[in-house]
Each structure stands twice: as structure tokens, then as C-alpha cells.
Amino acid sequence: MKCFEKLVRDFITSSLPASMDPLQFAYRHNRSTDDAIAHLLHTTLTHLDEGRGNYVKMLFVDNSSAFNTIIPSLLTTKLGDLGLHTSLCDWISNFLTDRPQSVRVGNCASSTLTLSTGAPQGCVLSPLLYSLYTYDCTATSSSNIIVKFADDTVVVGLISDNDERAYLEEIKHLENWCQENNLLLNISKTKELIDLSWSRHTSSLAKKARQRLYHLRRLRDFRLPSKVLRNFYTCTIESILTGNITVWFGNSTKQDRQALQRVVRSAERITHSELPDLQTTYYKRCQTKARKIVKDPTHPNNRLFSLLRAFRERKRLPDGQDREAEEELLPTGHSGPESGKLINCGDHHH
């Protein structure tokens, strides 16, 4: 069944308009959590730079058992509005309704219930169906944006002159939208961000990485080859230190960066080999991310990058100069202030 679900998922994805819900960053080609965070930070920093007294409020919204509260009839109506064929909408409705469910613990099983609400947890289709169910949850004011990644939602209010009315009205509109769509807000887990410091985040990363150094030392004590030690470092330690690095490393303080780099230096002593430093990894991933965005005209951040004339004329360059022209796309001083802010998010020490 999961194989068939994958076929249906891919068919639905290929049938959707590219312009649909551009600020939903989940389940779309060339989108990830760091794209969502980068867009969020760029919007925030741009507004703060536009005028003295400007500030931003962010409300991170949590829904209780979001997948379990989807109304299939409402979902299929929305799928039809998106242009999906009636037969496919009917199949999805049939897939989600009259589902038998029971719970088994050991040799004990509960009585069977028939469910006609929600999308089954663990199904291949459920995350995509939820994102389509919420595609019409968008900001109503130009001074607000709503950024989504699957069932994670943040309302961003760009506030000037201490006028928060549009932001508060947006929250009220979101509350009404949730009620109309049978989604229950989890008030205890819905939080408003008041500080953009990354120190707590980097401290958490350093702590997790240091804990895994113990296992790296144990492997060394067992006299495993240096190559195996490096692979273990890459999979279990570097992956922690560099997760979404393009959106937070540029805003981290010098002290926080040094704390993270000390973990890398400790790993080098254990593995007896040179490992990539975080600054280099950060620059390389920024470059990779920038090139992907430039090549994707449907990406919400594509408009922030402008191709230089030298790159547009690369076909006329002598052999060997293509690489030099390509470098001019990067946000490290060549692509303009907008693209630089997107990737680097203020690459300085606080």
C-alpha cells in the first residue's frame, strides 16, 4: 500500500501549480527547513533595517493532533479547487473515511472503531494531504506573513510606529480559520519569540556534540582505522554542528563559534586527521544554497539574487573562466545586499 501511496503522492505533487502556497516549504522540490528559516530571518532583518522603531513579532503556532482532525470532505473540496481530478479526490475521500482501527498490546487487542476523520499517522500521503489542507491559511495583511513547514506555522508581524493592530487581527483571523477547518490550537505550546539570539541554540549543539565525542574516543581505543573514525565523526558529530548552518552561523557570536570549533579540534586530536572547520563548511553551503535558489524561479527567495552581466555572458568567456564568473553569483559581496542578507543574515559578531 505504501508503494501505491508514493505513486499517488508523486502524481499529486506534479499536478499542483508551482505558485501554490509559496511560503509552505515542506514536501516541495528544492525546499527545506533552512529555506523557511532563511526567508523568515531575511524578512525580519529587512524590516528592522527599514526604519528606526520598527520591530517584529513572531508567533509560533502549534495545533493539537493536527493530522487527526482533518475533515476529508473539506480536504477533497480544497483539492478540487486546486485542479485535481474528481476521480482522484474521490479516491482520497475513500482512503480517509470508514477506516477500521484497533490497538494491540501483546496478546490483548481493543475493540475496533471506524474512523472517518483525520489522516492516518505514518502514512506516506498524510503529510502532503495536511499541507494541502492548510494551503489557504495565508496572511490577510501586507504587514504580516505566515510561513509554514508541514504542520509548523509561524505568524510574523512587521510592526511600525508601535501599531500592532494588523498583527493582532492576523492572529484572530488564524484562530477563526482553525475553527472553520476543525484544527485545535494548542495554547500551551504556542509561543511568541522575543529574542533572536542564537546562543542557546549553539550551546545546545555544543553539548550534544561533546557527548558524542565519548563514543569517538571509545572507537579510537578499540584501534579502529582513522577512516572509520572520520566517518563516525561526519555522521554523528559534524551533522549536529552543521545542521541548518546557513541560517544561524552568520548570526552567532565569536564566543559561540569558538565553543563549537573546540569540538572540531577535539575530534581532530582523537581521529589524528584534519577535519573541515565550521567557517569553511558555512561558506561552501551558502554557495551551494545560493546556486540552487538562483536556478529555481519558483523559490520565494529567487528574486533576491541578481545575475551579474559577466555571468550572463559566460558563454562568450574563454575556457577556464566559467568558474570565475560563477563565483560572482555568490552572496559574499558580489550578488548585492539583498542576497547577502538572505544567506549570511548579518555575518558579524555581536
Image (tube, grey):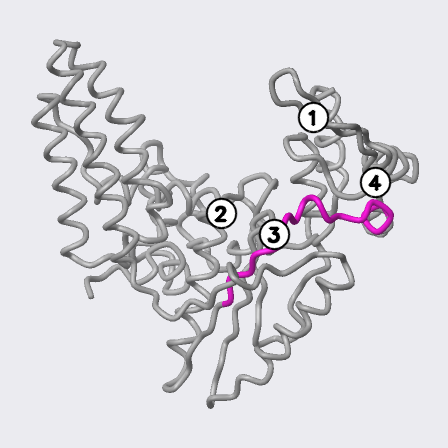
The quadrant in which residue 90 appears is: top right
Q: Position of residue 23 (x, y in %)?
A: 59, 56
Residue under label 3, please give it: 24
Between disc 1 and disc 2, whose residue precedes?
1
Residue under label 1, please give it: 6
Q: Are marks 4 and 3 in contact (CB under 8 Å)?
A: no
Residue under label 2, please give it: 293
Which is closer to the viewer, label 2 or label 4? 4
Q: Position of residue 303 (x, y in %)?
A: 52, 59
Q: Position of residue 124 (x, y in %)?
A: 67, 30
**The residue stretch that appears in magenta:** 59-76
Measure the alpha-carbon separation of dots 4 and 1. 22 Å
The quadrant in which residue 314 appears is: top left
> How packed is label 3: few (under 14 Cα within 10 Å), some, or many (20 or more)?
many
Which numbered marker is on residue 116? 4
User: Which quadrant does the C terminus fall into?
Assistant: bottom left
Front residue (pair 115, 56): 115
